[in-house]
């Protein structure tokens, strides 16, 4: 196996194209800090690197667990769900993936310690929560019907809060409001990607919202939560001091409405719902990015 081929395999294994989420989450916290007059570009870059390593670790632990439980053997793979397929094809060994998961988590932890040293020990609380979510998500939280919630909080909202804290040494009311939509969007990214995997997940011992309530009820929950994403910036402006610029995130609202339409119409037809999964990724990344832009333009 050549070097170039090995790099290509590992890039697909860590789902490199989805790591943009880690970057835009840090951007929201960094943009919030910039808006409030406190921004260090070096700390920003280091934070991005740390969060990217944490997200890589999540994907690798998930891939290893899905191989161990046989979920990925039963999954109908899509560009947005079902894993990379590298373990099933024999392109990588399970031990390699498991080792890489721990290495990337340790790297993220070391970077986090450095950020805590320069910004304050309080960020360790957010780090600890994220670490627990990474290690125990697939084997435990995903089987307790709280997987999406835990991921949204720790790998969505807490990333925004932590990215702001390492810049400013505090948590503002505004950034708390700003952290809620990304948390919801991170949860919804997982939720919609689970629609094609219900049978495989059930056989593998997972217990998530779709398995518990069915696709129709899950579609209702998805739709309500997606609409709340656009409500919280408005509430943040009215109740607190979020800048009016965050309303630029409403540019993704029409696409969000169209996704809801497709989920309700094709929620039980796996091939027909695949386009909605792709559009969901766009809404998640674009809404997060636009919220960061909103803080920059004020």
Image: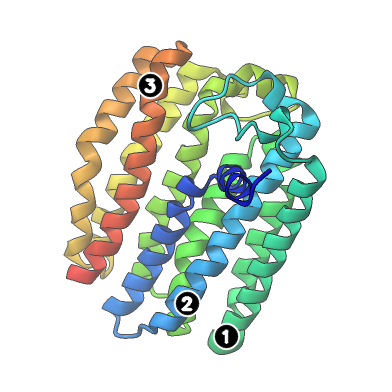
Please tell me whether mark 3 sits on a helix, a strand or a loop: helix
Q: Is residue 82 above or below residue 96?
A: above
Quadrant in the rendering for residue 75: top right
* Quarter containing the N terminus: top right
The 10 Å Cα crowd at callout 3, few under 14, some 14 to 19, many 20 or more, is many
Tell me: 37 left or right of 244: right
In space, the residues marked 2 and 3 are separated at their CA atoms by 37 Å
Where is residue 191 drawn, in percent x and y? 51, 33
Quadrant in the rendering for residue 283: top left
Tell me: 131 left or right of 33: right
Residue closer to the observer: 174 or 30: 30
Q: Earlier in the sequence, mark 1 or mark 2?
A: 1
The 10 Å Cα crowd at callout 2, few under 14, some 14 to 19, many 20 or more, is many
Question: For the point 46% across and 17% down, which residue is it?
Answer: 216
Residue closer to the observer: 270 or 143: 270
* Quarter containing the C terminus: bottom left
Question: For the point 65% across and 61% down, which residue is it?
Answer: 129
Say if mark 2 contacts mark 3, CB within 8 Å: no
Asked whether residue 206 appears in the rendered view, the answer is: no
Residue to which mark 1 is pinned: 120
Residue to which mark 2 is pinned: 165
Residue closer to the observer: 104 or 295: 104
Question: For the point 28% across and 67% down, which residue is it?
Answer: 240
Q: Earlier in the sequence, mark 2 or mark 3?
A: 2
Where is residue 33 drawn, in percent x and y? 35, 77
Q: Earlier in the sequence, mark 3 or mark 1?
A: 1
């Amino acid at each position: 196996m050549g070097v170039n081929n090995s790099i290509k395999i590992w890039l697909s294994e860590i789902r490199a194209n989805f790591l943009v989420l880690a970057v835009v989450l840090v951007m929201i916290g960094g943009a919030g800090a910039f808006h409030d007059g406190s921004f260090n570009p070096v700390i920003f870059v280091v934070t991005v690197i740390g969060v990217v390593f944490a997200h890589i670790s999540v994907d690798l632990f998930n891939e290893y667990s899905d191989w161990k439980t046989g979920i990925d053997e039963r999954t109908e793979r899509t560009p947005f769900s079902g894993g990379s397929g590298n373990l099933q094809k024999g392109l990588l060994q399970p031990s390699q993936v498991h080792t890489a998961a721990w290495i990337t988590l340790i790297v993220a932890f070391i970077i986090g310690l450095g950020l805590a040293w320069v910004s304050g020990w309080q960020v360790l609380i957010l780090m600890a929560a994220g670490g627990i979510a990474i290690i125990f998500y697939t084997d435990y939280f995903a089987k307790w019907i709280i997987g999406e919630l835990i991921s949204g909080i720790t790998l969505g909202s807490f990333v925004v809060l932590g990215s702001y804290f390492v810049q400013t040494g505090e948590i503002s009311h505004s950034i708390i409001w700003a952290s809620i939509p990304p948390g919801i969007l991170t949860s919804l990214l997982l939720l919609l990607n689970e629609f094609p995997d219900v049978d495989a997940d059930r056989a593998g011992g997972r217990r998530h919202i779709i398995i518990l309530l069915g696709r129709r009820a899950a579609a209702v929950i998805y739709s309500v939560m997606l609409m709340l994403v656009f409500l919280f910036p408005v509430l943040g402006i009215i109740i607190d001091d979020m800048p009016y610029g965050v309303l630029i995130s409403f540019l993704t609202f029409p696409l969000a409405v169209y996704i809801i339409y497709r989920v309700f119409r094709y929620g039980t037809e796996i091939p027909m719902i695949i386009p909605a999964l792709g559009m969901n990724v766009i809404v998640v990344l674009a809404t997060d990015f636009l919220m960061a832009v909103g803080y920059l333009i004020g």
